[in-house]
Amino acid sequence: MVNQPRRVRDQFAGRVWRVRALLVIADIGGYTKFMTVHRINLAHAQYVVAQLLESVIDAAAPKYELAKLEGDAAFFYAKLPDTPKEHELAAFSERIVKIRTAFIDRRAELEINRVCSCDGCVQASKLTLKFVSHLGEVALQKVKHFTELAGVDVITVHRFLKNSVTVPEYVLMSTPVFERLDPEMKVLAEPMKEHLEGLGEVDTHVVDLQKAVQRAGQATPSRLRAWLGWLKMTWRSLPYFLGLKKSCDGFKTLPAIQGREP
Ligand SMILES: [Zn+2]
């Protein structure tokens, strides 16, 4: 829809339609509460998370469309045919691995070419990526150039973010996702249960990504890249540093600084 001419796009404006869809949230975490609340730290944390989210979004495309950026998380969806098929999510594990690999590579690149020693930059190497996923029916509504997703399944996948999983990097999925997975990922999943606010107890299946995917970042150091990266970061951080924009708005990874001064 995004690439269609405006005349065609406008015909869909405001229209709501229902589709089966796979819903995936990729969520960055790992900043500790010990981060000093300082404008530079926060502006650089904002930049670091934006860089990592960019790598996640690039690796998710074109299969998964970005529905929304939600602070330090990205919400994706992939439309599915009306008739369910066995193993219809066979490419799911492959895509998760691809996204995670892109994240790890970008994180390694940021670390190896780091020239700043503020908390926002130093703690970047400790950041983690987790996924929650659900499959269900969603209502899509075209609003200007954006597609809004709504429905109880959209709420469910968001509720999965608050869970009892103790490992730092994982995929938590609902039973409909688990049932349609390829056998390779299925065998790695551990059954769990979550109590979701307003939705009750739900069966879940969790794959520990640190066990499932072993791959270190392959970045090589470069002085030029380091300084170009620093220039880019300084330029992009300027509006946050000057207080024209609010750093780290909606970042769940920084709970300690909620309610801070803008
Ligand atoms: Zn910094």
Image: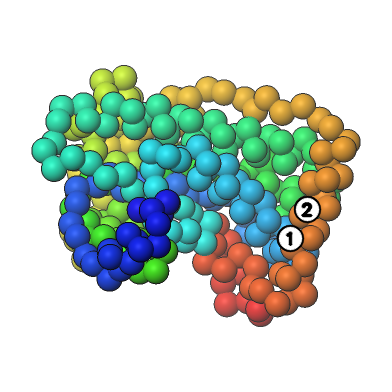
Q: Is residue 173 above or below residue 247?
A: above
Q: Is residue 23 above or below residue 62?
A: below
Residue 86 appears left or right of 62: left
The quadrant of the rendering that contains the C terminus is bottom right
Residue 25 appears left or right of 18: right
Which residue is denoted by mark 1 in the rendering?
A: 236
Q: Residues within 10 Å of mark 2 (few under 14, many from 20)?
A: few
Q: Amino acid at mark 2?
A: Lys
Numbered tag placed on residue 245 in the rendering: none
Q: Amino acid at mark 1?
A: Arg
Is the residue marked 1 within 8 Å of ligand 1, measured from its CB?
no
- Percent of width and height locating residue 143: 35, 69
Q: Is residue 148 visible?
A: no
The image quadrant of residue 246 is bottom right
Which residue is denoted by mark 2 in the rendering?
A: 232
Residue 220 appears left or right of 143: right
Judging depth in this view, the residue of 185 and 33 nearest the camera is 185
The image quadrant of residue 167 is top left
**So how many labels did they put on this image?**
2
Q: Residue furthest top?
A: 184
Verify CB contact (< 8 Å) between mark 1 and mark 2.
yes
Judging depth in this view, the residue of 55 and 61 nearest the camera is 61
Q: At x 28% / y 65%, what residue is drawn?
A: 11
Judging depth in this view, the residue of 97 and 21 nearest the camera is 21
- Percent of width and height locating residue 2: 41, 54
